[in-house]
Image (cartoon, rainbow, N blue to C red):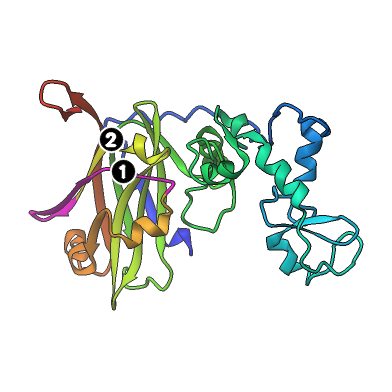
Amino acid sequence: MESDSVDYVSLTDGLDDEEVTQHRHPFPKPHGGGAPPLPGIAPTTSVHELLECPVCTNSMYPPIHQCRNGHTLCSTCKSRVHNRCPTCRQELGDIRCLALEKVAESLELPCKYSTLGCPEIFPYYSKLKHETRCNFRPYNCPYAGSECSVVGDIPFLVAHLRDDHKVDMHTGCTFNHRYVKSNPREVENATWMLTVFYCFGQYFCLHFEAFQLGIAPVYMAFLRFMGDENEARNFSYSLEVGGYGRKLTWEGTPRSIRDGHRKVRDSHDGLIIQRNMALFFSGGDRKELKLRVTGRIWKEQPNLDSGVCAQSL
């Protein structure tokens, strides 16, 4: 995808165009914590090492396999090493390490995201399930223009977007942008733009892109919240595009960046503009795309009397 196929112009009417404060800091590597030593067993750190698969270095869960010399590995890696022990090259067979499986059952371990703030401690078997949905687990980079593999917490990703992807950063809860494209009929690859807004103490990603829907290209704008879904529900946003006496509007709740960019786009959860309508809004000879997208973000405040949410402007 080529980001330079769309020229993006930010019109900061009423906007405080301040640079977002840098929050870069190292993203610590998660690690296990300390459970009390078991009788007759080495200190807990040694137990954790025993439960580490020598191939993938992940924690081993039953069935735990071993060779005739006692070397262990997880069931996933057993097929990857073609039934040969990666340590001594002996044939693995179907020997289970029941003793190590019993040790695993007796452990209670902190979440591997404890270094990011998770205070929970779980039995060994429950830990893995929790970590797949832990609110403290790192986020994937929300940049849509590449398959970026960077993960981290929100402050780290904000700095990453600004410094590595050169994303525009704005402070304020309203936006007024103009998107220009010289040839609106060419969308062999999705054309995209990303802008980050900081308001209400939170970060939001505004996406604008073109993609093929059926036989014709469409244009779409949508907002994602840099945080979890339960926090995203506290906010709403509106988008508007128009011209020459016509306009389209969209209002909704921002999606969390836990939902991938493509998932949000393919669900059509945003402002969608058909090509013919986009060209009408652009005016002129209808051969160049010139769209002005405006909008705002607000926080929903619970109304204690009625039990519903009211807008906080």
Position of 183 relative to 51 (above/below): below
Residue 267 place in picture, x, y as percent: 31, 60
Q: 288 or 47: nearer the eye? A: 47
Position of 177 relative to 265 (above/below): above
Question: Which residue reaches farthest left?
Answer: 245
- The residue at 32%/54% (across/down) is 179
Residue 307 place in picture, x, y as percent: 15, 27
In the picture of the structure, the residue carrying the numbered disc 1 is 254
Secondary structure beneath dot 2 equals strand
Quadrant that contains the C terminus: top left
Which numbered disc flags the more N-terminal residue, 2 or 1? 2
Q: Any magenta on residue 243? A: yes
Question: From the viewer's perspective, is 10 left or right of 44?
Answer: left
Question: Which residue reaches farthest top?
Answer: 305
Q: Residues within 10 Å of mark 1 (few under 14, many from 20)?
A: many
Question: From the viewer's perspective, is 40 left or right of 143?
Answer: right
Residue 118 place in picture, x, y as percent: 55, 30
- The residue at 56%/36% (across/down) is 156
Task: Report the number of discs.
Answer: 2
Position of 196 relative to 117 (above/below): below
Marks 2 & 1, CB-CB < 8 Å contact: yes
- The residue at 46%/55% (across/down) is 144
Q: 199 or 301: nearer the eye? A: 301
Q: Is residue 301 visible?
A: yes
Secondary structure beneath dot 1 equals loop
**Mark seen at residue 9:** none
In the picture of the structure, the residue carrying the numbered disc 2 is 235
Residue type pointed to by label 1: Pro
Q: Any magenta on residue 210? A: no
